[in-house]
Amino acid sequence: MSTTFLQRWWQGLDKPGWRAFAVAMLALTVAMLFALYSAAAAERGWFWMAGGAAAAALGLSLWVAVTIVPALARRTPLRWLVIQINYRITREGWVYVAGIFALAIAALNTGNNLLFMILSAMLAAIAVSGVVSRLSLSGIEMSLALPEHIFAEQPVLAKVKLENHKLSLPSFSLRVGPHPKAKTAGILTRPAYFPYLARQSAAAQSVELRFPRRGVYRQDAFAVSTRFPFGFLEKTRKVESPMAVVVYPRVLPTEEFYEILPMISGEIESYQRGRGHDLYSIRDYQPTDSARFVDWKASARSAALKVREFTREDERRVVLVFDPYLHPAPGQSPAALAEQFEKAVTFAACLAWHFYEIDSQMQFRTDELVTPMAVAGEIIYDVLRHLSLPAR
């Protein structure tokens, strides 16, 4: 196992960067030796030797500053060091700070060196907490993946993914959620927790989300926070990730839907043999016929097996027309009008989805969208997307 770890470490090592760093350290060491020799030569009165050694030390230092330092800077992800992080003292942190103040007063009153040492250790713990938590938040990239089609009031699984691009340090105890200062926070309403994220690796968590209404949900920023290692401070990093998702209207049938559906079935009956409901003819039984179609009364009269044939029902063809304009009744409040409009949108979506499920021919017509008469599966999501837009 140690060999495998060393191999992974060696493969992930930035060899050119470390080579440049080693050359810089060697050059600066030689420059320091030249500087020491220059000081010793000046004390002995060897001014030409001292000047030459000082010039060599200065030249080596300038060479490192001009050639190697910029190369190392380009290979260093400095953007991780300048990220904006917000601080918040937790409840445990306030208790810890109160303990520090109490210990500081006791140390000042008594002059006990042991209390001063304990006080220094407690202050150092806060500094260590701040540095370690900042390192945990640096080098982290976040993404959110949602299903292609989302319906109101139906749960969906969103996948929150974190990537740790740090070369050597892992991250601990990360929580992803909506940013408290974001303008909109309508998509990721439940946080996702990542206890550990190894270096140069990625991890994903599934979060169940539910959108209560149709419409376009937007979120301009997310928050990646941590309380690691001691929980005294909660540091939050804002991740800019503007995104928008379209939530379709609810398509679960309602009681009103079941009442009206039989009147708009869209079936067209033809006078051809098929699997309809009305009788087409009675003929002699054939070995391939099913016994459930046998007409026993006709068979008894003719002393031979007879079967029933039915008319064929052609494919359903419907034209779904939706009026998007609000027509208030006298004395109707805006809230009641909006609720009535939402019911109409939901009913239209249920109808469109029903004819999609039975593979009908459908056309949708409204003020801004007119689809061709086509198989419902080809236009259903265009219809639902249009119905998800806000009322005008």
Image: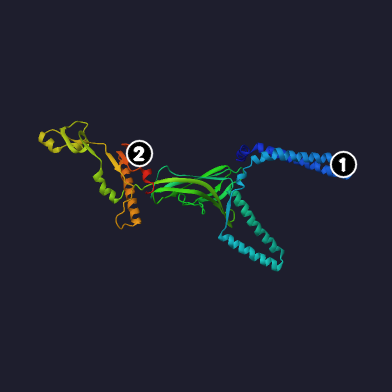
Task: Give the residue drawn at x 63%, y 57%.
Answer: 126
The scheme the figure's colours follow is rainbow
Instruction: Kindly identify which numbered label has been placed on residue 276.
Output: none
According to the picture, the residue beneath numbered tag 1 turns out to be 47
Out of 292 and 340, give the one closest to the viewer: 340
Report which residue position mark 2 lands on: 379
Q: Which type of secondary structure does the marked residue at label 1 adopt?
A: helix
- Circle 2/circle 1 CB separation < 8 Å: no
**Residue 27 located left or right of residue 168:** right
Q: Quadrant of residue 383?
A: top left
Can you give x and y, in whole percent of width and height, for residue 379 in the image?
35, 39
Say which residue appears at 84% left-offset and 44% top-offset.
Answer: 39
Q: Is residue 360 visible?
A: no
Q: Residue at x 60, y 45 (%)?
A: 79
The disc, 2 or 1, on the residue closer to the chain's N-terminal end is: 1
Question: Residue at horizontal 70%, vertical 63%?
Answer: 114
Secondary structure type for disc 2: helix
Query: What's the distance in space between the residues labelled 2 and 1, CA to CA?
Result: 91 Å
Three-letter code for the amino acid on which mark 1 is drawn: Phe
Which residue is situated farthest in the front direction here?
Answer: 330
Extreme residue toward the bottom, this view: 109
Residue 281 is drawn in which quadrant? top left
Q: Quadrant of the N terminus?
A: top right
Which of the two residues, 168 or 392, is positioned nearer the viewer here? Answer: 392
Q: Position of residue 349 (x, y in %)?
A: 33, 45
